[in-house]
């Protein structure tokens, strides 16, 4: 028996073939990825009052609150000579990207129940497609950071060229737990209410509103088990340069945790997705 794949080439159906060629199929269904991504973008901004302006308002107001609470009231130090507002926003950017991917991808599978129960395709396409919306919001927020740096007269160094690397790391840090949570939510629907709570707690325990340098040195390695510590430090290093050096041993710990979570999340998702159509 045969059918046709998105590239209009015959796809032979045989036992175990989907497992053996899963990652090849994931590439073949790239057109579906773009369709789902465009759908998510359209749904996000269709019939909204302020539309894309919300992507400005939310991070800007969070930055103001953190700057007042941690900078003015708690008197926590900034990174070198950098203004506290710039330091906060440089940490808020990767966290917002992380949180958006985690929140949207984790509920994406149950949100596409009608599609999943009708046709075959690598289910991983669904949570991965939500990354596009988060990236659009990230680029909008990046414009605020550029405005802040212009206001304070800050000029980034050569490190800014490495910023895309840390954007990729932020996405990888989010995708691992997001796809694991997506597979879990299919079976346990109430788990979706835990994700916003975890995201909110993570905002305050990660070095977003403060510098990771305020953590005592003997706790730095343990603190870096939070993978966003290394990512946020990397963002600040790219933007502030020498004023915000990276703690490299801790950064390597964060990289290992990101890799482990990504592999573990993909394995958990692949193991569960065969039953999605039956459970969902």
Image (cartoon, rainbow, N blue to C red):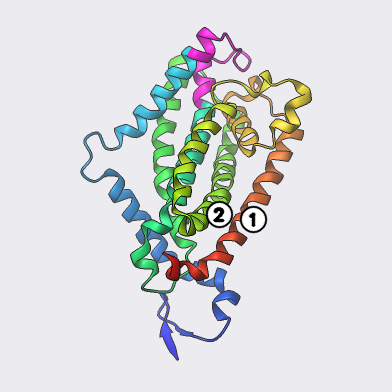
Outermost residue toward the right in this view: 218
Q: Which range is magenta? A: 69-89
Quarter holding the C terminus is: bottom left
Q: Which residue is mark 2?
A: 180
Looking at the rendered structure, the secondary structure element under dot 1 is helix
Instruction: Judge whether residue 131 can be spotted in this image.
Output: no
Rounded to the nearest angstrom, the CA distance separating label 1 from label 2 is: 8 Å
Residue at image coords 37%, 56% = 111
* Disc 1 packing (10 Å; few <14; some 14–19; many ≥20): some
Q: Position of residue 228 (x, y in %)?
A: 60, 36
Quarter holding the N terminus is: bottom left
Q: Position of residue 192 (x, y in %)?
A: 45, 47
Instruction: Judge whether residue 39 can be spotted in this image.
Output: yes
Check residue 226 for magenta coloring: no
* Disc 2 packing (10 Å; few <14; some 14–19; many ≥20): many
Looking at the rendered structure, the secondary structure element under dot 2 is helix
Tag shown at residue 24: none
Check residue 75 for magenta coloring: yes
Q: Position of residue 13 (x, y in %)?
A: 49, 85
Tag shown at residue 264: 1
Q: Are dots 1 and 2 in contact, CB under 8 Å?
A: yes
């Amino acid at each position: 028996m045969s059918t046709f794949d998105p590239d209009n080439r015959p796809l032979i159906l045989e036992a175990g073939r989907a497992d053996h060629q899963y990652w090849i199929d994931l590439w073949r269904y790239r057109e579906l990825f773009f369709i789902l991504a465009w759908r998510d973008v359209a749904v996000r901004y269709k019939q909204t009052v302020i539309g894309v302006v919300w992507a400005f308002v939310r991070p800007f107001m969070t930055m103001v609150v953190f700057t007042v609470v941690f900078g003015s009231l708690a008197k926590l130090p900034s990174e070198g000579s950098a203004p506290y507002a710039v330091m906060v926003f440089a940490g808020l950017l990767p966290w917002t990207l992380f949180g958006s991917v985690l929140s949207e991808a984790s509920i994406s599978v149950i949100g596409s129940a009608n599609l999943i129960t009708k046709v075959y395709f690598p289910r991983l396409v669904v949570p991965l497609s939500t990354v596009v919306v988060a990236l659009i919001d990230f680029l909008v927020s990046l414009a605020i950071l550029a405005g802040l740096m212009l206001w304070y007269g800050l000029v980034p160094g050569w490190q800014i060229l490495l910023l895309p690397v840390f954007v990729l790391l932020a996405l990888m840090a989010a995708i691992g737990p997001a796809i694991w949570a997506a597979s879990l939510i299919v079976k346990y629907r109430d788990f979706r209410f835990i994700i916003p709570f975890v995201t909110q707690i993570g905002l305050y325990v990660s070095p977003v509103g403060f510098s990771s340098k305020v953590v005592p040195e003997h706790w730095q390695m343990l603190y870096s088990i939070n993978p966003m510590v290394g990512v946020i430090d990397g963002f600040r290093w790219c933007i502030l340069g020498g004023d915000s050096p990276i703690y490299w041993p801790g950064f390597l710990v964060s990289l290992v945790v990101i890799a482990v979570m990504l592999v573990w999340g993909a394995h958990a998702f692949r193991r569960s997705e065969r039953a999605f159509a039956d459970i969902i």
